[in-house]
Image (cartoon, grey):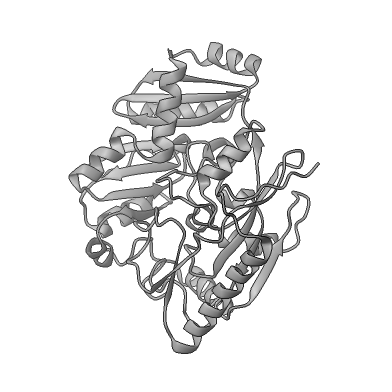
Amino acid sequence: MAITATPATPSAPPSAAYDAILEGFAARIRQAAEAGTPLRIEGGGSKNFYGGPLHGEVLSTAAYRGVIAYEPTELVITARAGTPLAEIETVLAERQQMLAFEPPRFSPTSTIGGVVAAGLSGPRRLQAGAVRDFVLGTRIIDGQGRILTFGGQVMKNVAGYDVSRVMAGSLGTLGLIAEVSLKVLPVPVAEATLRFACDPAEGIVRVNRWGGQPLPISATAWHGGALWVRLSGAEAAVAAARAVLGGEAVDDGAGRALWQALRDQTHAFFASADAAGTPLWRLSVPSTAQPLDLPGETLVEWGGALRWLAADLPADKVRTTVLAAGGHATLYRAGDEAKVRAGGAFQPLSPAMAALNRNLKREFDPKGVFGPGRLYPDF
């Protein structure tokens, strides 16, 4: 049975008012395209640090909010872009369900549109998958002010699915994500956290060995001489895995606090880098890659596939080292000047990938209205 939820505000406008808001967005985009005025799409502004320097007039989606439909038995929720992430999670928690990719909650202002546009996933990415894996459908407004719908609201509907997935991680450079349908999953019945004292090389070997076994590992993290492993699933499966893995059992409250801090990036590693103003790199590499020969403080997640590096190093040195390991490097948190010196926040694309991205941009935003320079300096 479908459950329809309305925005959690005492004076939520009727559907017609939302239609008017959507048409207003489209008109503003058409005007910007005609005038050559760049626009910067913003929900709560909690992820403005991510990507290249910000340019353009702000087009806020905050007023376009509310859960449109929630079907617990179908494991699908559909919401408007400006809906706070906290509101989505509250609705899901009432049915013991969740956004399994654990998007970071940078601020109470974080919106579901921003979650999809940024494409950032938390610790459970290791087990559940990334944001794009959960996007079933989207309604967007392209750079010509056209309101377009892709995908659907059920998991079996694959029409237009790839187009919806392209929006994940696009940082609003292809269009305004007006509405999104996401797959949700049940909250695990049981969870436990284990701690192991080891160096990073040993930690990487362990998590990759365990990853090849039928163990309910939902997250891993190495930092400061210790490896933490989260188990999630049925009580019997979690208990059996604890017996197999050994290690030191972490108090349930402390375990939850740890994974929440890693998810929301409030962990001491992130807080220390932020307080010191140290550039923070996000390094994606094959999970089996050995510790990288780069000085600085490191935190390793996702079974070794995600390496965080807090270090003030030349961008060329970081990117060359990561590329040699088979990965790519993102200057995740740093000042605009540092990002410009680095040639952009994201690793430069290969010629083939650059051509593909230009073609997508040309198709969705031919006048270059949305977020110039947010993904790549020439994009």
Whether residue 295 is visible: no
Taking the view exactly as shown, the residue that stands out farthest to the left is 276
Q: Position of residue 315 (x, y in %)?
A: 26, 58
Horizontal and vertical percent for residue 131? 56, 49
Q: Position of residue 172 (x, y in %)?
A: 49, 66
Query: Which residue reaches farthest right?
Result: 1
Residue at (29%, 36%) from the top-left corner? 269
Question: Would residue 152 be seen by someone viewing this image from the given angle?
Answer: yes
Q: Nearer the viewer, residue 256 or 362?
A: 256
Q: Residue furthest bottom?
A: 34
Is residue 335 rendered to the left or right of residue 82? left
Can you say which quadrant of the picture contains the N terminus? top right
Q: Is residue 343 above or below residue 332?
A: below
Q: Position of residue 106 (x, y in %)?
A: 40, 45
Front-lying residue, 213 or 118: 118
In the image, taking residue 61 as reference, residue 19 lies left or right, namely: right
Reply above or below: 239 against 141.
Answer: above
- Please identify the quadrant where the C terminus is shown: bottom left
Pick the front one: 267 or 9: 9
Measuring 64% from the left and 30% from the top, which residue is drawn there?
A: 96
* The quarter of the displayed image where residue 38 is located: bottom left
Identify the residue at image location x=76%, y=62%: 159
The residue at the point 67 percent across, 62 percent down is 15
Q: Quadrant of residue 161?
A: bottom right
Figure label count: 0
